[in-house]
Protein backbone atom coordinates (compact mmCIF):
# COMPACT_ATOMS: atom_id res chain seq x y z
CA UNK A 1 0.00 0.00 0.00
CA UNK A 2 2.84 2.38 0.91
CA UNK A 3 4.47 1.75 -2.46
CA UNK A 4 1.22 2.62 -4.28
CA UNK A 5 0.85 5.78 -2.18
CA UNK A 6 4.40 6.82 -3.07
CA UNK A 7 3.70 6.25 -6.77
CA UNK A 8 0.50 8.29 -6.54
CA UNK A 9 2.34 11.15 -4.80
CA UNK A 10 5.05 11.06 -7.49
CA UNK A 11 2.45 11.19 -10.27
CA UNK A 12 0.65 14.12 -8.61
CA UNK A 13 3.90 16.03 -8.17
CA UNK A 14 4.82 15.51 -11.83
CA UNK A 15 1.34 16.53 -12.98
CA UNK A 16 1.52 19.67 -10.84
CA UNK A 17 4.88 20.57 -12.39
CA UNK A 18 3.51 20.11 -15.90
CA UNK A 19 0.45 22.24 -15.16
CA UNK A 20 2.60 24.96 -13.64
CA UNK A 21 4.90 24.97 -16.67
CA UNK A 22 1.90 25.27 -19.02
CA UNK A 23 0.48 28.14 -16.98
CA UNK A 24 3.82 29.97 -17.09
CA UNK A 25 4.36 29.41 -20.83
CA UNK A 26 3.72 32.62 -22.75
CA UNK A 27 0.80 32.71 -25.16
CA UNK A 28 1.65 32.94 -28.86
CA UNK A 29 2.73 36.49 -29.58
CA UNK A 30 0.18 38.62 -31.41
CA UNK A 31 1.46 40.24 -34.59
CA UNK A 32 3.16 43.56 -33.99
CA UNK A 33 1.10 46.37 -35.45
CA UNK A 34 1.56 49.95 -36.58
CA UNK A 35 -1.09 52.34 -37.86
CA UNK A 36 -0.70 54.77 -40.73
CA UNK A 37 -3.42 57.42 -41.01
CA UNK A 38 -4.56 60.22 -43.28
CA UNK A 39 -6.43 58.16 -45.87
CA UNK A 40 -9.99 58.60 -47.13
CA UNK A 41 -12.05 55.40 -47.21
CA UNK A 42 -9.05 53.13 -47.87
CA UNK A 43 -10.27 49.94 -49.54
CA UNK A 44 -7.21 48.03 -50.69
CA UNK A 45 -3.45 47.88 -50.11
CA UNK A 46 -0.96 46.36 -52.57
CA UNK A 47 2.78 45.84 -52.13
CA UNK A 48 4.57 46.82 -55.32
CA UNK A 49 7.51 44.47 -54.88
CA UNK A 50 9.64 45.88 -57.69
CA UNK A 51 9.60 49.41 -56.26
CA UNK A 52 9.15 48.29 -52.64
CA UNK A 53 6.26 50.62 -51.94
CA UNK A 54 2.70 50.16 -50.70
CA UNK A 55 -0.20 51.39 -52.83
CA UNK A 56 -3.47 52.33 -51.12
CA UNK A 57 -6.74 52.83 -53.00
CA UNK A 58 -8.89 55.61 -51.51
CA UNK A 59 -12.58 55.62 -52.44
CA UNK A 60 -13.33 59.02 -50.83
CA UNK A 61 -17.01 58.44 -50.08
CA UNK A 62 -19.42 56.01 -51.66
CA UNK A 63 -18.13 52.72 -53.15
CA UNK A 64 -20.71 52.93 -55.96
CA UNK A 65 -20.69 56.59 -57.08
CA UNK A 66 -18.88 57.79 -60.19
CA UNK A 67 -17.74 61.09 -58.74
CA UNK A 68 -14.13 61.26 -59.93
CA UNK A 69 -12.84 62.17 -56.47
CA UNK A 70 -10.84 59.03 -55.64
CA UNK A 71 -7.07 58.61 -55.49
CA UNK A 72 -4.26 56.11 -54.94
CA UNK A 73 -1.51 56.75 -52.39
CA UNK A 74 2.12 55.62 -52.17
CA UNK A 75 3.45 54.64 -48.73
CA UNK A 76 6.93 53.50 -47.75
CA UNK A 77 7.36 50.25 -45.78
CA UNK A 78 8.31 52.29 -42.70
CA UNK A 79 4.89 53.96 -42.79
CA UNK A 80 5.74 57.29 -44.40
CA UNK A 81 3.13 58.61 -46.83
CA UNK A 82 5.28 59.41 -49.86
CA UNK A 83 2.54 60.74 -52.12
CA UNK A 84 -1.03 60.88 -50.84
CA UNK A 85 -2.57 61.53 -54.27
CA UNK A 86 -0.10 59.72 -56.48
CA UNK A 87 -2.89 58.85 -58.95
CA UNK A 88 -5.64 61.44 -58.59
CA UNK A 89 -9.11 61.09 -60.09
CA UNK A 90 -9.39 64.89 -60.05
CA UNK A 91 -6.41 65.26 -62.40
CA UNK A 92 -6.83 65.83 -66.10
CA UNK A 93 -6.76 62.64 -68.11
CA UNK A 94 -7.31 60.39 -65.08
CA UNK A 95 -10.57 58.54 -64.40
CA UNK A 96 -10.87 57.14 -60.90
CA UNK A 97 -14.23 56.97 -59.13
CA UNK A 98 -14.27 54.34 -56.39
CA UNK A 99 -11.10 52.21 -56.65
CA UNK A 100 -11.01 48.90 -54.84
CA UNK A 101 -8.75 45.90 -55.49
CA UNK A 102 -5.45 46.27 -57.35
CA UNK A 103 -2.88 44.02 -59.02
CA UNK A 104 0.30 44.48 -61.00
CA UNK A 105 1.02 42.39 -64.11
CA UNK A 106 3.38 43.08 -66.98
CA UNK A 107 4.40 46.45 -65.58
CA UNK A 108 0.80 47.62 -65.43
CA UNK A 109 -1.29 48.49 -62.41
CA UNK A 110 -4.87 47.22 -62.74
CA UNK A 111 -7.52 48.83 -60.52
CA UNK A 112 -11.16 47.72 -60.11
CA UNK A 113 -13.45 50.74 -60.43
CA UNK A 114 -17.18 49.90 -60.25
CA UNK A 115 -17.77 48.63 -63.81
CA UNK A 116 -14.34 49.05 -65.42
CA UNK A 117 -10.70 48.24 -64.85
CA UNK A 118 -8.43 51.29 -64.88
CA UNK A 119 -4.93 50.60 -66.18
CA UNK A 120 -1.89 52.66 -65.16
CA UNK A 121 1.86 52.45 -65.62
CA UNK A 122 3.08 50.80 -62.42
CA UNK A 123 6.28 52.85 -62.36
CA UNK A 124 4.93 56.39 -62.67
CA UNK A 125 1.13 56.09 -62.41
CA UNK A 126 0.46 57.39 -65.92
CA UNK A 127 -2.97 56.34 -67.25
CA UNK A 128 -2.79 53.68 -69.97
CA UNK A 129 -6.50 53.20 -70.65
CA UNK A 130 -9.58 51.41 -69.40
CA UNK A 131 -11.06 47.95 -69.82
CA UNK A 132 -14.83 48.20 -69.77
CA UNK A 133 -16.60 45.13 -68.37
CA UNK A 134 -20.03 45.11 -69.97
CA UNK A 135 -22.82 44.22 -67.56
CA UNK A 136 -20.64 44.50 -64.45
CA UNK A 137 -22.30 45.52 -61.20
CA UNK A 138 -19.56 46.14 -58.63
CA UNK A 139 -16.07 45.03 -59.59
CA UNK A 140 -14.20 44.48 -56.36
CA UNK A 141 -10.93 42.59 -56.03
CA UNK A 142 -8.19 41.88 -58.58
CA UNK A 143 -5.55 39.13 -58.69
CA UNK A 144 -2.84 38.50 -61.27
CA UNK A 145 -2.15 35.08 -62.82
CA UNK A 146 1.24 33.80 -64.07
CA UNK A 147 0.35 34.36 -67.74
CA UNK A 148 -0.21 38.10 -67.18
CA UNK A 149 -4.00 37.88 -67.07
CA UNK A 150 -6.02 39.16 -64.15
CA UNK A 151 -9.05 37.73 -62.36
CA UNK A 152 -11.64 40.19 -61.05
CA UNK A 153 -14.57 39.60 -58.72
CA UNK A 154 -17.97 41.17 -59.38
CA UNK A 155 -19.74 41.27 -56.02
CA UNK A 156 -23.16 41.63 -57.63
CA UNK A 157 -24.41 44.27 -55.19
CA UNK A 158 -25.35 47.89 -55.05
CA UNK A 159 -25.53 50.04 -51.94
CA UNK A 160 -28.59 52.01 -50.85
CA UNK A 161 -29.06 53.69 -47.47
CA UNK A 162 -25.89 52.03 -46.24
CA UNK A 163 -27.11 48.49 -47.02
CA UNK A 164 -26.16 46.03 -49.74
CA UNK A 165 -28.78 45.19 -52.36
CA UNK A 166 -28.27 42.20 -54.62
CA UNK A 167 -28.34 43.05 -58.34
CA UNK A 168 -27.54 39.57 -59.68
CA UNK A 169 -24.30 40.28 -61.56
CA UNK A 170 -22.20 38.01 -59.30
CA UNK A 171 -19.25 36.73 -61.33
CA UNK A 172 -15.57 36.07 -61.69
CA UNK A 173 -14.12 37.81 -64.72
CA UNK A 174 -10.86 37.11 -66.53
CA UNK A 175 -9.06 39.80 -68.53
CA UNK A 176 -6.14 38.66 -70.66
CA UNK A 177 -3.02 40.78 -71.31
CA UNK A 178 -4.60 42.06 -74.53
CA UNK A 179 -7.68 43.33 -72.70
CA UNK A 180 -10.11 40.62 -73.80
CA UNK A 181 -12.83 40.03 -71.22
CA UNK A 182 -14.43 36.67 -70.43
CA UNK A 183 -16.42 35.35 -67.51
CA UNK A 184 -15.16 32.31 -65.64
CA UNK A 185 -18.36 32.17 -63.60
CA UNK A 186 -21.51 34.24 -63.93
CA UNK A 187 -24.15 33.10 -61.47
CA UNK A 188 -26.56 35.27 -59.45
CA UNK A 189 -26.68 32.47 -56.86
CA UNK A 190 -23.06 33.12 -55.88
CA UNK A 191 -22.89 34.70 -52.39
CA UNK A 192 -21.31 37.95 -53.65
CA UNK A 193 -17.65 37.22 -54.51
CA UNK A 194 -15.17 39.62 -52.98
CA UNK A 195 -11.53 38.76 -52.24
CA UNK A 196 -9.61 36.76 -54.84
CA UNK A 197 -6.14 35.20 -54.88
CA UNK A 198 -4.43 33.09 -57.55
CA UNK A 199 -1.66 30.55 -56.95
CA UNK A 200 -0.59 27.09 -58.11
CA UNK A 201 -3.29 26.88 -60.73
CA UNK A 202 -6.07 27.66 -58.26
CA UNK A 203 -8.32 30.66 -57.75
CA UNK A 204 -9.38 31.32 -54.17
CA UNK A 205 -12.51 33.37 -53.51
CA UNK A 206 -13.91 34.91 -50.33
CA UNK A 207 -17.55 36.03 -50.16
CA UNK A 208 -19.41 39.01 -48.80
CA UNK A 209 -22.53 36.93 -48.38
CA UNK A 210 -21.14 33.72 -46.86
CA UNK A 211 -18.72 32.68 -44.14
CA UNK A 212 -16.59 30.59 -46.47
CA UNK A 213 -13.82 30.58 -49.03
CA UNK A 214 -13.72 28.42 -52.14
CA UNK A 215 -10.87 27.04 -54.21
CA UNK A 216 -11.60 26.91 -57.93
CA UNK A 217 -9.64 25.44 -60.79
CA UNK A 218 -8.57 27.57 -63.75
CA UNK A 219 -11.90 26.95 -65.49
CA UNK A 220 -13.96 28.09 -62.50
CA UNK A 221 -14.96 24.63 -61.21
CA UNK A 222 -15.07 24.43 -57.42
CA UNK A 223 -12.53 22.08 -55.84
CA UNK A 224 -12.78 22.89 -52.13
CA UNK A 225 -14.97 24.80 -49.71
CA UNK A 226 -13.72 25.99 -46.32
CA UNK A 227 -16.05 27.35 -43.63
CA UNK A 228 -14.96 30.26 -41.45
CA UNK A 229 -16.20 31.42 -38.04
CA UNK A 230 -17.77 34.66 -39.34
CA UNK A 231 -18.81 36.24 -42.62
CA UNK A 232 -18.84 39.54 -44.52
CA UNK A 233 -15.46 38.51 -45.87
CA UNK A 234 -13.36 40.99 -47.79
CA UNK A 235 -9.61 40.70 -48.30
CA UNK A 236 -7.86 37.44 -49.15
CA UNK A 237 -4.17 36.68 -49.57
CA UNK A 238 -2.47 33.34 -50.07
CA UNK A 239 0.99 32.95 -48.59
CA UNK A 240 3.81 31.01 -50.21
CA UNK A 241 3.40 28.17 -47.69
CA UNK A 242 -0.26 27.70 -48.68
CA UNK A 243 -1.88 29.52 -45.76
CA UNK A 244 -4.76 31.88 -46.42
CA UNK A 245 -5.36 35.15 -44.59
CA UNK A 246 -8.95 36.43 -44.79
CA UNK A 247 -10.49 39.59 -43.34
CA UNK A 248 -14.01 39.53 -41.86
CA UNK A 249 -16.09 42.62 -41.16
CA UNK A 250 -18.46 40.62 -38.95
CA UNK A 251 -15.59 39.50 -36.71
CA UNK A 252 -13.49 42.64 -37.01
CA UNK A 253 -10.57 40.27 -37.50
CA UNK A 254 -8.24 38.48 -39.87
CA UNK A 255 -8.53 34.69 -39.97
CA UNK A 256 -5.61 32.38 -40.70
CA UNK A 257 -6.47 29.21 -42.64
CA UNK A 258 -4.03 26.34 -42.99
CA UNK A 259 -5.35 25.13 -46.33
CA UNK A 260 -2.38 23.01 -47.40
CA UNK A 261 -3.04 19.36 -48.19
CA UNK A 262 -6.28 17.43 -48.08
CA UNK A 263 -6.74 17.36 -44.30
CA UNK A 264 -9.42 19.41 -42.57
CA UNK A 265 -8.08 22.99 -42.57
CA UNK A 266 -7.19 24.61 -39.27
CA UNK A 267 -8.78 28.03 -38.84
CA UNK A 268 -7.66 30.52 -36.20
CA UNK A 269 -7.79 34.25 -35.57
CA UNK A 270 -4.51 35.87 -36.56
CA UNK A 271 -5.48 39.37 -35.39
CA UNK A 272 -8.58 40.93 -33.86
CA UNK A 273 -9.72 44.43 -32.95
CA UNK A 274 -9.65 45.45 -36.61
CA UNK A 275 -12.88 47.32 -37.39
CA UNK A 276 -13.96 47.38 -41.06
CA UNK A 277 -10.95 45.39 -42.37
CA UNK A 278 -11.07 45.62 -46.16
CA UNK A 279 -8.89 44.24 -48.98
CA UNK A 280 -5.63 42.85 -47.61
CA UNK A 281 -2.12 43.21 -48.97
CA UNK A 282 0.96 41.12 -48.22
CA UNK A 283 4.63 42.13 -48.06
CA UNK A 284 6.41 38.79 -48.44
CA UNK A 285 9.87 40.32 -47.95
CA UNK A 286 8.94 41.38 -44.41
CA UNK A 287 6.21 38.84 -43.56
CA UNK A 288 3.90 41.79 -43.13
CA UNK A 289 0.13 41.94 -43.55
CA UNK A 290 -1.35 45.22 -44.78
CA UNK A 291 -4.89 45.90 -43.52
CA UNK A 292 -6.91 48.93 -44.66
CA UNK A 293 -9.52 50.01 -42.12
CA UNK A 294 -12.28 51.21 -44.42
CA UNK A 295 -14.19 53.36 -41.94
CA UNK A 296 -11.22 54.58 -39.89
CA UNK A 297 -9.08 56.09 -42.65
CA UNK A 298 -6.07 54.03 -41.57
CA UNK A 299 -3.85 51.21 -42.75
CA UNK A 300 -2.54 48.75 -40.17
CA UNK A 301 0.85 47.12 -40.72
CA UNK A 302 0.95 43.72 -39.00
CA UNK A 303 4.34 42.03 -38.74
CA UNK A 304 3.54 38.32 -38.69
CA UNK A 305 6.06 36.09 -36.88
Image (spheres, rainbow, N blue to C red):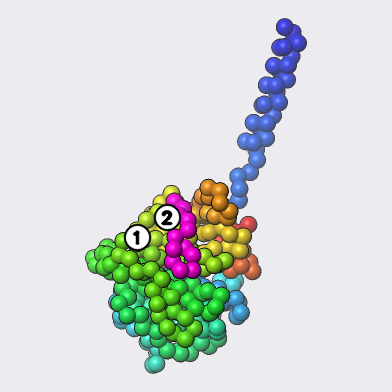
Q: Nearer the viewer, residue 34 or 187?
A: 187
**Residue furthest to the bottom:** 92
Q: Secondary structure at mark 2?
A: strand
The mark nearer the N terminus, 1 or 2, is 1
**Which residue is under mark 1?**
191
The residue to which callout 2 is attached is 212
Which residue occupies 37% across, 61% down? 208
The CA span between labels 1 and 2 is 10 Å
Residue 174: give x, y in percent of width and height.
43, 75
| In-image side of 303 versus 109 (left or right) | right
> Is the residue 48 above or below the residue 283 in the image?
below
Residue 297, position as x, y percentages in the image: 42, 69
Mark 1–mark 2 CB contact (< 8 Å):
yes
- Numbered badge on residue 93: none
Image coordinates of residue 288 in percent, x first then y, are 58, 64
Q: Quadrant of the C terminus?
A: bottom right
Q: Residue at x 35, y 80 (%)?
A: 133
Q: Of all residues shown, which one is farthest toward the left?
A: 161
Q: Classify mark 1: residues with Cα within 10 Å, few (<14), some (14-19) or many (20+).
A: many
- Judge left or right: residue 165 versus residue 54: left
Disc 2: CA contacts within 10 A as few (<14), some (14-19) or many (>=20): many
263 or 231: nearer the eye?
Answer: 263
Image location of residue 260, percent across then percent down: 58, 55
Could you tell whether 29 is left or right of 153 in the image?
right
Q: What residue appears at the point 54 percent right and 55 percent down from the top-left corner? A: 259
Q: Does residue 222 sit above or below 269 in this rendering?
A: below
Q: Residues in magenta?
A: 216-228
Question: Splitting the image into 4 quarters, where does residue 214 fall?
Answer: bottom left
Q: Secondary structure at mark 1?
A: loop
Residue 62 makes an appearance in the image: no
Please determine whether, in this image, residue 31 is positioned above or below residue 105. above
Amino acid sequence: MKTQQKRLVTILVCLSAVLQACAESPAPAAPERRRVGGFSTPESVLHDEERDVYLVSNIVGSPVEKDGSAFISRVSPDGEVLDLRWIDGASEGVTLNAPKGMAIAGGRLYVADIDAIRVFDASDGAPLGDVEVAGAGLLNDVAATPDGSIVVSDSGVSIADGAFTSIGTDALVRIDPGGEVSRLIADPALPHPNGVACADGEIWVAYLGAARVDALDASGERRREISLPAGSLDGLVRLDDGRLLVSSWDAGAVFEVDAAGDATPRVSTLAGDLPSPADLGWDRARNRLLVPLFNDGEVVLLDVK
